[in-house]
Image (cartoon, helix red, strand yellow):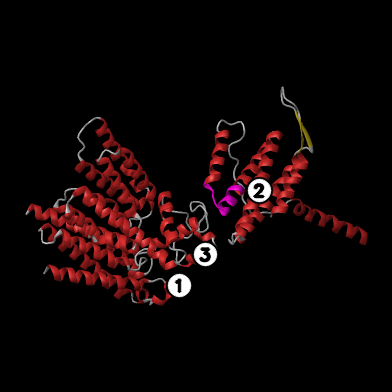
Amino acid sequence: MKVKLLFFISICLFFLVLPKVGYAESNYVLPYPSFMPGTALYKLHILYEHIQKYWYFGNFSQFSYNLNLSNKYLVEAKTLFEYKQYLLAHQALYKSNEYFTEAYRFLGRSKQEGKDTNQRVATLKNASEKHREVLWQIKTEIPEIYIWKPEKEKQTTLFLWKQIDKAIEIRKNSA
Amino acid sequence: MKKIIIVVYLITLFLFTVFSYLFIDQNLFYLKDFFTGIAFNYREVTTFIYLTLIFLFSIFYYLFLWLINTKKLSMFEAKWLIGITVGILFFSYPAMLSYDIFNYLTTSKVAFYYHENPYVVMPIEFVNEPFLSFTRAANKIALYGPVWIFLTGIPYYLSFGNFIFLLFGFKLFITLFFVLTIILIWKMTKNLFQVALFALNPLVLIETLMSGHNDIVMIFFALFSFYFLHRRNILFAAFFLFLSVFIKYATIFLIPVFLYCLWQMYTKQRVEWEKIYQFSALLMIFVFFLSPVREEIYSWYAIWFLGFISLVSIKKFIYQASIIFSFSLLLRYMPYMLFGTYLAPVPALKNILTFIPLFLFTIYYVLKKKI
């Protein structure tokens, strides 16, 4: 009887705890998807992003700029993964990782300048949690490896899970 | 009689400068030794003194214009009068009626001390920044144009990190533009009355030399643009209009007039400058009355059209109306001074005080004309 009861409690606890293990609950809000690759204005939008980089001078501004773009590309990657556009999604996630690392770097530089970064550290931490939450979710919906075979071009092997794990690792280490 | 008027005027100016220090903010620790709190504890008395002083300034303004009009005040005397006025008001406390100067200082610090883009980062984001305790718009990104932000680097760097130097450096900077504007009006009109109409206007003096509003910088560049346009130097004219627009954006409404002038020049038509200035003044009045759409009418916005009004041959109604309106716009400060709140009934009272005197004057003028 005791064994059965313990087994029952263990099962209940397992199912109660499991969802919390899988996904962090973050209040951080990610943006709506922006222009997608393939749309007419996408390249113009990329150009606009590059120009914006000079507008966002200063370490605090650069932090915001990089974090916003990291968010934007994560959402872009998620949308593309959902549409099974794995190569484009792979590229978008790579960009998101780069911008996230940059955001962290500029936060460090702000701190070196003696600026109070507590608020931004918290923002980055929340963003990191939300990103990881999204990345975990993506990982459950995509194949581990995907071979992208475009017409008349060389095929590419995409190690999707590996890339997701790397993205999670970057966010874990940066926050 | 003339000497007595001038002496009493200068005494009034001096008293006004002293009076302005009663308004020192408790949080402005850089001037804590001058803090009395009188303006906040004796609101009725303070409001009454303010009313008396601005009433006196309006009377003096009228008297000086009358003295100049009747040739009883020479060019030399007028120059001295304006010079001493500038000298006395320069030392007044700038945040008596508006805290804008602190916004200028803090925005400048965001750009030149923290090296951050003030259009992206708000002052409030610098948690331990000492200026935050007395800056009112700390939770806003830069409100003014990039040319203004860029120019503020001059007084900022010349202050060498000293707050008093910085505060009065900004005032000096604004004062320089006031002097340049007067010189420009003289160059464009060669008429002492028209210069005095602008240079001795109590609203212009208080808002520029005391409160240090940057509207004078915008108007100087706009007038300078028309000065060059008059001399057919289109490149310089366009450049200075560009500078003006990117100080505070309001002069963007002058672009149609500017293009119209260019078109007239291109088609070899005679440019009627009097009409151009009249139309520019009207456009600036239009923008002035448009300001409640964005926020509310601020007294210092009147500088936008007063600058152009001073360029046109003045009719009696116009100059009397501008005296009345300048006075009534200065009355707008009274409700807040008295109640210490921006909530009801202050907004309604502000509007009543602004428009009733002008309305009464118009009725009086129409009735007088009929009689």
- Real-space Cα distance between discs 3 and 1? 13 Å
- Taking the image as shown, residue A81 lies to the left or right of residue B261, namely right
Looking at the image, residue A107 lies above or below residue A38: below
Protein chain holding label 3: B
Q: Residues within 10 Å of mark 3 (few under 14, many from 20)?
A: some
Query: Which callout, 3 or 1, points at the residue further toward the start of the chain?
Result: 1
Q: Which residue is mark 3?
A: B129
Q: Quadrant of the N terminus of chain B?
A: bottom left
Q: Which residue is mark 1?
A: B29
As drawn, the label of residue B360 is none
Of badges 2 and 1, the one in the foreground is 1
Quadrant of the rendered image containing residue A135: top right
For the stretch drawn in magenta, the main secondary structure is: helix
The secondary structure type at the circle numbered 2 is helix
- Taking the image as shown, residue B71 lies to the left or right of residue A161, namely left
Q: Is disc 2 in the same subunit as disc 1?
A: no
Give the residue drawn at x 49%, y 56%.
Answer: B112
User: Residue type at mark 1?
Assistant: Phe
Protein chain holding label 1: B
Q: Quadrant of the C terminus of chain B?
A: bottom left
User: Residue type at mark 3?
Assistant: Glu
The secondary structure type at the circle numbered 3 is loop
Residue A84 visible from this viewpoint: no
Q: Which residue is mark 2?
A: A100
